[in-house]
Image (cartoon, helix red, strand yellow):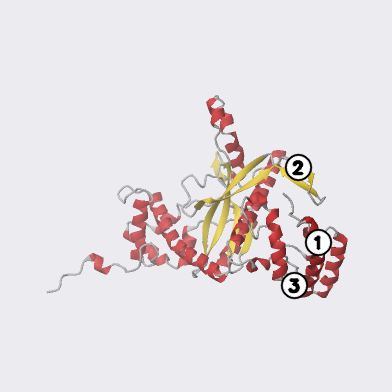
Amino acid sequence: MAAAPTANAFRSAEPARSGLDADALQRDVIDNLICLQARYPAIATPHDWYMALAYSVRDRMLARWVATVQAYAAREVRVACYLSAEFLIGPQLGNNIVNLGIEANARAAMQALGQDLDMLLALEEEPGLGNGGLGRLAACYMDSLATLETPAIGYGIRYEFGIFDQAIRDGWQEEVTDKWLQKGNPWEIVRPDVTFYVSFGGRTESQTDAQGHLRMRWIPANKVKGVACDIPTLGFRVNTCNTLRLWKSEAVESFDLQDFNAGDYYQAVQDKVISETLSKVLYPNDEPEAGKRLRLAQQYFFVSCSLQDMLRLLDLKSEPDDVAGILIDLAERETKSLSTQFAHKLGSEMKAVTRMHKKPLKSAGFRVLRAPDVPSVLVELGYVSNRQDLQSLVSETWRNRTAESMAQAIETFLSSQMAGGAAGGAHTGAN
């Protein structure tokens, strides 16, 4: 006589980390409750259950994120980069459950564990990353790009505190600190290996190189480290999951042991306090002069980190030809790029211009430019000294509206310039 089937015999065959049915989701919630939060059902609070469910939903998103990144890398696609000082993304749990199409299964899984899905959804803090139309528009762009399965990365600032929370006391509104991160953010993936340094203040020094060209060198007064914090952005009912990369500011050296041992405890952590101010608050009050400076520093900080990250991603590409297409944007659809040969010539020289990156980047100097800006870059890099001649050349070929004529004319001009200056050696650009 056959043995009676056990309860496990009816369990779903879908993996706990990526399965979409109620049973797989239920198993993953218990796993995350125990393994990530060191809790168990008998003592778990409602917030513990919320975090466990959020981690379980994120597991399914990350499986799609990995597949998305691998597909982008295999096809060598171009990625749109959207920079915004704010992203009003809203609560993520309900949105991601709907995007995955598992609302009914999530409700059933949590009901089997004795929890109400609607109550857990109400526990989520509103991410303090945006405020108003600009932030909502940016978030809608990211959602739409993922839904349309368009390769994209969003760049912004990972604010520790939102703009403010509202409290009513004695019938009056009172603005209080928006501590949206005080209980953690299950959607955030901190990447301490993706960091960049941003310099502020200081002075400049001038010098003349071996070819007699005037060069300027920037000596910054201080530096701040930007750390990448990623939030996966899943499209609606598709498997494409893009990235929202936010930058958190940190001190290059967060603690001075010598000052601490000397008894100056405040000075020992001064750099940490000053550096972390950049990503401390969404939209600080800009009425005082200090507030205006802080807002400007915030913009400069996250734009610099984002551009450096773009260059890092370009450097990961296997073929330099893939970078040539974005070397110069000539503003017309029929004139998208210069020839690959010219891009290689200019690209090899641009390596020397980016010594500040402390590593060779074949694409670090590539810029997005309009046609009238081309001469300025070539002169800056030391290829040519006669800006007027090259400007006339570009203007004439620009009227022809063809990339081929532009590329051929510039290559011919560069060849004559480089042949003439071969005895003096190649130009190496700025320090």
Residue in the image at 84% along x and 73% along y: 399
The tag earlier along the polypeptide, 1 or 2, is 2
Crowd band around label 3 with a 10 angstrom C-alpha radius: few (<14), some (14–19), many (20+): some
Point out the frontmost of discs 3 and 1.
1
- Residue 143: give x, y in percent of width and height: 56, 64
Q: Which residue carries the number 2 mark?
A: 204
Q: Which residue carries the number 1 mark?
A: 375
How far, Cα to Cα, is label 1 from label 2? 24 Å
User: At label 3, which amino acid type do we have?
Assistant: Thr
Crowd band around label 2 with a 10 angstrom C-alpha radius: few (<14), some (14–19), many (20+): few
Residue in the image at 36% along x and 59% along y: 28
Crowd band around label 1 with a 10 angstrom C-alpha radius: few (<14), some (14–19), many (20+): many
Instruction: Name the one closer to the observer, 416 or 239.
Output: 416
Q: Residue furthest left?
A: 1
Asked which secondary structure carries label 2, the reply is strand
Up-down relation of residue 431 to residue 76 (above or below):
above
Question: Splitting the image into 4 quarters, where does residue 263 fall?
Answer: top right
Asked which secondary structure carries label 3, the reply is loop
In which quadrant is the N terminus drawn?
Answer: bottom left
- Residue 385: give x, y in percent of width and height: 84, 57
Up-down relation of residue 430 to residue 322 (above or below):
above
How far, Cα to Cα, is label 2 from label 3? 37 Å
Residue in the image at 87% along x and 63% along y: 389
User: At label 1, which amino acid type do we have?
Assistant: Pro
The numbered mark at residue 335 is 3
Up-down relation of residue 406 to residue 33 (above or below):
below
- Residue 41: give x, y in percent of width and height: 31, 51
The tag earlier along the polypeptide, 2 or 3, is 2
- Residue 27: give x, y in percent of width and height: 33, 60
